[in-house]
Structure formats: structure tokens, C-alpha cells
Amino acid sequence: MKLICIGRNYADHAKELKNEVPTEPVIFMKPDTALLPKRNPFFLPDFSDEVHHELELVVRINKIGKSIEEKFAHRYYDQVTVGIDFTARDIQAKCKEKGLPWEKAKAFDHSAPLGEWVDLGGRDIQNLNLELKKNGETVQQGNTNYMLFSVDRLIAEVSKYFTLKIGDLLFTGTPAGVSKVERNDRLEAYLDGERLLALNVK
Ligand code: MG
């Protein structure tokens, strides 16, 4: 399985990092070794001094598909959760400066913790509230309504290039409020008020 991630999908986050608002989705990937086994703490990697949390809606693909039309994309998922796209911002800045790929900054081991899966049910995937608390204080808050590219559009775009398989995960980008995590921080992520993910930083 693969983790397909979208960058700069909320205008307020693109602005906070002084990036241009994209005219097409920014796509990158993480390997399955980026998943964090359940109930494990996240250990800060020693190669970075600035790991940021990025709270994101994550969609689980439930059907194989290639070149999926946007209008049919909703048939390819029925479960969602929240995840964190941990990013070594200092390494990413160096990669960006040199025009190099981001993998070292984005795709390292355990950089993609996931919450518990929930059925989307009758809910509108473009009207879900996201919230991240750090040590009990809200640091990121957003609604999927503010995505620049909807989940269905992302599935259409991504599947032009990559065949989607059952169990593939789509990280859909982060709203504003990213910040550095420190040892002993506790992160708790909520979807529509329901806590789906909690982890400790070590
Ligand atoms: Mg991200």
C-alpha cells in the first residue's frame, strides 16, 4: 500500500509557509514504513531540529482504480480518519531551496500516524471539522470545506498518474497552524469533535 499526500491544499496554510497557492494539486508520497504502529509514541528523529505537525483528513481507498473521473470518485472510499503528516521543516527548507525532492523531510519512518477509522456514513466529506490539540490547547482547526481541491478532485488527479489500490491512503493536506513539536508534547486529533488519535512525542 502507499500513502499519497497532498501539499498546500488549504490557502491559509500555503500562506503561512509563504508558498504560492497552487493551480493544481501538489502530490508526494510516503512509503508504508511511515506508518506509526498503534499506541506507539512518536520519537523525534535525530536528523532534524524542527519537526512540525500537520493535521490532515485521511481517506482510505476501498477499490482499485485508474484515471477515475471526479464524478465517480466518491465510490472509491467510505472510511476516513485524521492523520499527522510529520514534516522535518528544516530539511524540507533545504530541499526546496535546492529544488530537490522532499522525501527526507516528509517520508521518514513513523512520519504518518493515523487515527481510528470511522465510516463516513451520510456525512459530506467536504464539511468535516478537523482539530488538533497540543498539550490540551487547540493549535490547528479547519474544515474540509476550505480545501482548494476537493477529495473527489484529488482522487481524479492522483489516479491519472498512479493506480489506486485497496488500502491506499490519501492525506489531503493541512490547514493553518502548523508548529514545532517538542519532546513530551501530547497531540490529540479530532474529526467532527470525536477524538480519533492521541500520541506522545518522545
Ligand atoms: Mg501535509
Image (cartoon, rainbow, N blue to C red):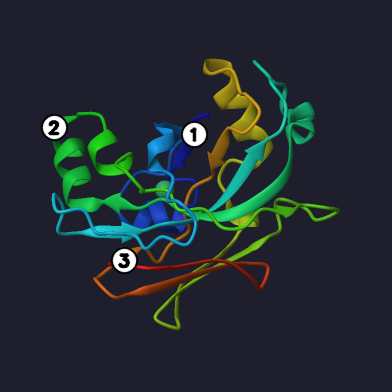
Which comes sooner in the sequence, label 3 or label 2?
2
**Gap between marks 3 and 2 measured at Cα:** 23 Å
- The three-letter code of the residue at mark 3 reads Ser
Left or right of residue 182, residue 39 in this image: right
Q: Pointers 3 and 2 in contact (CB under 8 A)?
A: no
Beta carbon of the mark 3 residue lies under 8 A of ligand 1: no
Decide if ligand 1 comes within 8 Å of the CB at mark 1: no
Few, some or many residues within 10 Å of mark 2 (<14, 14–19, 20+): few
| Helix, strand or loop at mark 3 | strand
Q: In this view, does 95 lie to the left or right of 155?
A: left
Instruction: Judge left or right: residue 138 versus residue 110.
Output: right
Q: Residue 4 carries which label?
A: 1
Q: Residue at x 59, y 34 (%)?
A: 154
Residue that label 2 marks: 98
Res. 24 in view: no
- The x and y percentages for residue 173 are 48, 48
Marking on residue 179 = 3
- Which amino acid lies under the numbered mark 1 shown in the image of this protein? Ile
Q: In which quarter of the image is the C terminus?
A: bottom left
- Spatial CA span between label 2 and label 1: 23 Å
Q: Foreground mark, 3 or 2?
A: 3
Considering every residue shown, the one lying at the far right of the view is 122
Mark number for residue 139? none
Q: Earlier in the sequence, mark 2 or mark 1?
A: 1
Secondary element under disc 2, as helix, strand or loop, is helix
Mark 1 vs mark 3: which is more N-terminal?
Answer: 1
Query: Which callout, 1 or 3, points to the residue nearer the camera?
Result: 1
Mark 2: which amino acid? Lys
